[in-house]
Image: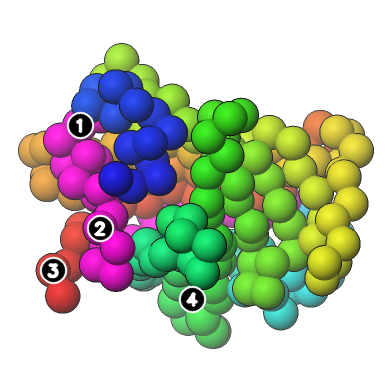
Amino acid sequence: MTIYQSLLGEDFHKLHPKLQERYALPVDVPFFATGTMTKIETGARWLNPLLTFATHWKFLFPENGQDVPFTIQNTCKLLSNGEAEVYWERTFYFKKGTRRFNAFMTIDAKRKVVKDYLGEPSLLYSDLKFDVTNEGRLLIRSGFQRVVLGKIELPIPRLLEGSVIVEEGYDAVRELFTIHVYIHNPIVGRVMAYAGEFKEHIC
């Protein structure tokens, strides 16, 4: 059973059937898709040095763009302790270069959250709360966050957190997945936002 099935329980079956397939993720059977981000927007220009710094960890990036090609791959594997982990690889192909946004996800069954380690090597940790909308879309919201410094993890004050909202759906008419992501900070406003669509490719 996938970590997302375990987390959502019966609500997993309320997802659109295509999203259920997407998030089934059998061990060592990757989900791979290609698509286009219709719009990618970052925040204020003075954030660019921070966003550029994050690129060294395959995390955030400073570029903006429209109709940006991208790929996404999710792979579930078993760790040495028997825990299932999903490796997320998101690659954005800008005209002037390629950017990556990677993450490693496991679940905390007791707290009913996904443990999301962002970047490679991980630079930021965030709790993620998963819900299903009435329309069968997947809604993800961030929670408690920490900065990761090797084996040390330091809590981030709430005013400095990057609050994340993600909504993923499936357009049955056009037969493709849709994605909307918004990262916001209460002080600086928008950190990054992107919206796009993608279609699975069977390897």
Residue at image coords 32%, 22%: 11
Amino acid marked by disc 4? Phe
Q: Give the numbered dot on residue 16.
A: 1
- In the image, which is nearer the foreground, mark 4 or mark 1? 1
Residue at image mark 2? 26
Q: Of all residues shown, which one is farthest toward the bottom?
A: 96
| Upstream in sequence: badge 1 or badge 2 | 1
- In the image, which is nearer the foreground, mark 1 or mark 2? 2
Residue at image coords 84%, 56%: 153
Secondary element at tag 4: strand
Amino acid marked by disc 3? Ile
Residue at image coords 69%, 67%: 122
Marks 2/3: CA–CA distance: 14 Å
Q: Quadrant of residue 112?
A: top right
Could you tell me residue 177's position as x and y percent? 25, 47
Would you say residue 41 sits in the magenta stretch?
yes
- In the image, which is nearer the foreground, mark 4 or mark 3? 3
Residue at image mark 4? 94
Q: Quadrant of residue 198?
A: bottom left
Marks 4/2: CA–CA distance: 31 Å
Could you tell me residue 106's position as x and y percent? 52, 51
Marks 1/2: CA–CA distance: 18 Å
| Upstream in sequence: badge 3 or badge 1 | 1
Could you tell me residue 78's position as x and y percent? 42, 64
Residue at image mark 3? 202
Secondary element at tag 2: loop
In the rendered view, would you say 195 is above or below 119? Answer: above
In the rendered view, would you say 131 is above or below 18? Answer: above
Secondary element at tag 1: loop
Which region is colored magenta? Answer: 15-43
| Upstream in sequence: badge 4 or badge 1 | 1
